[in-house]
Amino acid sequence: MSNEQPIRVLIVDDHPVVRDGLRGLFAGDPGFEVVGEAENGREAVARTEVFHPDVVLMDLRMPELDGVEATREMVARGLEAKILIITTYDTETDVLPAIEAGATGYLLKDTPRDELRNAVRSAAAGESVLSPPVAKHLMGQMRRPARDTLRYTSDAA
C-alpha cells in the first residue's frame, strides 16, 4: 500500500457483538483505523465531533437517538464525516429518511466483508453507496412520483 493515510472509521451500534465484529473486520487492514465506537446516536454525534472520522458506520435503530436523527444532527452541525447506514432494515420507510437526512450510503448487515470495506473506501472518497436490495427499493420509490406526475399531466391535457 502507498503512503496514504488510513481511512478513519467510527463504529456506531447498540449491540456490542456487532461493534466487535466490525472492529475486527477493519483492524486487520492497514487501510483503515477504527478511531472510536458509540452505542447510540447521541454518543455518535459527540464522538464524531471529537475524533473527526472520515466515515461513520451508523446503525439505524438505537436507543436515545436513532441513526436517522443522529445523521441529521451531524449534518446540521456541519460535521464532515461521511455516514454509512448499516442495518438489517431495507424497507422504503427506513431507507428514504436516512438518505434524506444526509447519509452517504445505506448497507445491509449481510454485506460481504470485502464489499463493506470497498463501500467504506467509496464513501470516504465521496461516492454514494447502496446495497443492491436498497437500490431497488429506492428506485421503486423514485419512479412512483414520476408515474403519478405523468398521470396528472395526461389528465390535464
Image: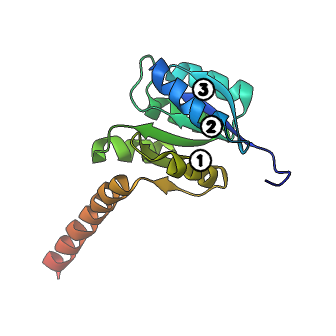
- The residues bearing labels 3 and 2 have C-alpha atoms spaced at a distance of 21 Å
Position of residue 129 measured from the top left corner of the image (x, y, whole percent): 50, 54
Q: Are marks 2 and 1 in contact (CB under 8 Å)?
A: yes
**What number is the disc on residue 21?**
none
Callout 1: SS: helix
Q: Earlier in the sequence, mark 1 or mark 3?
A: 3
Q: Which amino acid does the dot numbered 3 rest on?
A: Val
| Residue assigned mark 2 | 26
- Asked which quadrant contains residue 68, the reply is top left
User: Which of these two is toward me, 125 or 148?
Assistant: 125
Pointer 1 local density, CA inside 10 Å: few below 14, some 14–19, many at least 20: many
Foreground mark, 1 or 3, reads 1
Position of residue 62 measured from the top left corner of the image (x, y, whole percent): 42, 23
The residue shown at (57%, 36%) is: 25
Q: Which amino acid does the dot numbered 1 rest on?
A: Val
Q: Are marks 1 and 3 in contact (CB under 8 Å)?
A: no
User: Which of these two is toward me, 28 or 121?
Assistant: 28
| Residue assigned mark 1 | 120
- Asked which quadrant contains residue 38, the reply is top right
**Residue 32 left/right relative to 153:** right
**Residue 148 left/right relative to 64:** left
